[in-house]
Image (cartoon, rainbow, N blue to C red):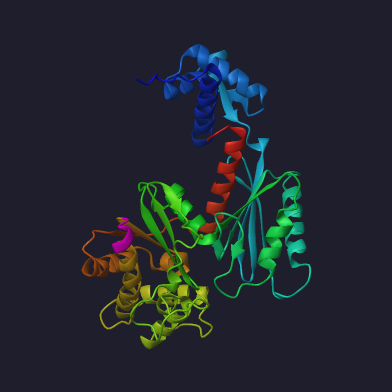
Amino acid sequence: MTTARTATPSTARAINDRLALNLLLEQGPLTATELRDLTGLSRPTVADLLDRLQRTGLVAVVGERGEQRRGPNARLYALVASRAHIAAFDVRAGGVTLVVADLAGRTLATAEVPVEDDAAPGTAERLVRTLRETARGAGVEQLHTVAVGAPGLVDPATGRLQSTGKLPAWHAELLAELRRLPDTEVILENEVNLAGRAEYRIGAARDRDTFVLMWLGHSVGAAVILDGRLRRGFSGGTGEICFLPVPGTTGLPSADSSEGGYHGLVGSVAVCELARAHGLPAAPDGNAPAGEAAVRAALAALGPGEPGGPFLDALAERIAIGAASVCVVLDPGCVVLGGEIGRAGGAELADRVERRLAGLSPLRTEVRAGTAGGGAILAGAVLTAGDAVRRDLFGEP
């Protein structure tokens, strides 16, 4: 016979505190009455937790609400967003974009730093110096957590970044330099995984606990979220679909190159080549912005006798080939198209991919256009850093 375990008073207080703090984070300032209604807690319990949270500096009275605007029931309580600050990095081959934000995730300052010479000495130090200057410009002296989104495999056991391509050495040097910041936690995550978190929390998959984000840009990758959890795999390689062997490429991928894999079918270079084959303009360098521009040109050229429709159908066919491979293994029920190319194609491309996918797989799969926007990686990094702060300050599990 087992004995039911009851929460100790301290555990119950911690649970109630977390509940109130998360409500203040999600909904903004609330009165004690509103907190009672939302939590179902008693008047004395709410009064006790508000007093306790004010003493810790996490909550403060910020005004009053109500017709008479006086008395304890009219007081508005809010999360003290300046209690901790975070930063987020989107690391690309040609530089970084960074954001400094408060505990509520509100952006306080941003910076873009190009890196034109990959081999230039002191690049990592310069980037961290820019972070410090950007933070100080926003009145922030101490960062609680920095979340970094970078291409490559992030080993779940060691937290180290392993390149699956030819990435510059300063990527790893930047991480080492950030980890020297005093009293600052540094979280490294694959960039597409961060974009997947953004789509899950604030984007196209907010109503889904299971879905796959397909990132279509210079290369292609995927973020896999099953039952509300991001899946990384044994070595952090879940979603490296650029290496997926598929029909239509000129060869096969290798351990050192994804050129013969799915990357060679839907990466931006291949998309630009496909656009030119359909009589659409596409820049010869074939980078991600060029692929995005080619898709937008196709959308502007829809109609009888126009090249936009045939190009989008051909692109949807290519995307659906990789999506079908993912779906018959994972059965996610929903695929979100993100990245520069997926975002540019919007609902028009997503609908075409869904129709073609239905002919390739017996598993019913909805295809949606990503809505987290061009800053999905940074948004996911801010969310990830914010989660880490709450685990520390709110005592969340």
**Looking at the rendering, in which quadrant would you find the N terminus?**
top left
Q: Residue at x 39, y 68 (%)?
A: 345
Location of residue 362 with respect to 202 vertically, above or below: below
Would residue 70 be seen by someone viewing this image from the given angle? no
Splitting the image into 4 quarters, where does residue 262 fall?
A: bottom left
Per the picture, the main secondary structure of the magenta-coloured stretch is helix
Would residue 147 be seen by someone viewing this image from the given angle? yes
Q: How many marks?
A: 0
Splitting the image into 4 quarters, where does residue 113 fall?
A: bottom right
Task: Give the camera-side residue of 393 and 107.
Answer: 393
Task: Give the camera-side residue of 116 and 236.
Answer: 236
The reply to whether the magenta stretch includes residue 62 is: no
Q: Position of residue 260 (x, y in %)?
A: 44, 81
Q: Position of residue 219 (x, y in %)?
A: 48, 72
- As drawn, the residue found furthest toward the front would be 1
Q: Residue at x 56, y 52 (%)?
A: 381
The reply to whether the magenta stretch includes residue 331 is: yes
On the picture, is 9 further left or further right than 187? left
Q: Position of residue 323 (x, y in %)?
A: 34, 67
Q: Residue at x 36, y 73 (%)?
A: 299
Q: Position of residue 204 (x, y in %)?
A: 39, 53
Location of residue 145 with respect to 170 vertically, above or below: above
Write down the region rendered in magenta.
328-332
